[in-house]
Image (cartoon, grey):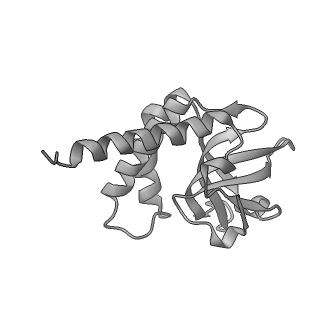
Amino acid sequence: MKNTNWQLIEAGQLVKFRYKNMKGISSNRTAFVLAPRYRYKKQSTKRVVEFFIGLEIENSSKGSLNPIVVKELFEQINDIFDEGKKSADYTDEATMKRIYAGLQRYLDKTSIFRTYFLRECRKRRVFLIEDSNDLIGGSLKGVVKLILEDKKEVLERALPDED
């Protein structure tokens, strides 16, 4: 786990941070970053508010997701990002709507699509998860193992036999 700051976070990374919600409850969270700085202009005041948007994989007060579900989510996210390679900016509104629509099947079952006030996030440190050993929950380590096994199977099928 690497200590970093909020300005260096990019879409597609796994981060761990502490966040205090609107009810005042603080908990440790692990999230897959979709948009590190999503700017939204409020209709009532015309003021611009920045959000951090991510998929909350683990929450210390709620628990973590099933590894199979997380693996399927990551596969779906890869497909969505591959489709959107034409646009370099993943933080625009159209891209967020496309990602949300693509993940709708999973989001109906579990509500993991989260928006956090970036102003509140910046009050505390953020850690970049670089290795599967950095993941605290055993279920997330299982996700990484499943993904690696699938990649290994795909490579074995793709390589020609040397007979």
| Res 125 quadrant in image | bottom right
Quadrant into which the C terminus falls: top left
Residue 15 position in % (x across, y down): 65, 55
Residue 71 position in % (x across, y down): 47, 38
Vertical placement of residue 142 versus 31, above or below: above
- Furthest-front residue in view? 163
Q: Is residue 101 visible?
A: no
Vertical placement of residue 54 versus 51, above or below: above
Name the residue: 33% across, 56% down.
82
Q: Total label count?
A: 0
Name the residue: 53% across, 61% down.
11
Q: Nearer the viewer, residue 42 or 154?
A: 154
Q: Nearer the viewer, residue 144 or 57?
A: 144
Looking at the image, residue 108 sits to the left or right of residue 8; the answer is left
Name the residue: 56% across, 66% down.
10
Looking at the image, residue 2 sits to the left or right of residue 38; the answer is right
Name the residue: 37% across, 45% down.
151
Quadrant into which the N terminus falls: bottom right
Looking at the image, residue 47 sits to the left or right of residue 95; the answer is right
Q: Is residue 14 visible?
A: yes
Residue 111 position in % (x across, y down): 59, 34
Residue 87 position in % (x across, y down): 36, 68
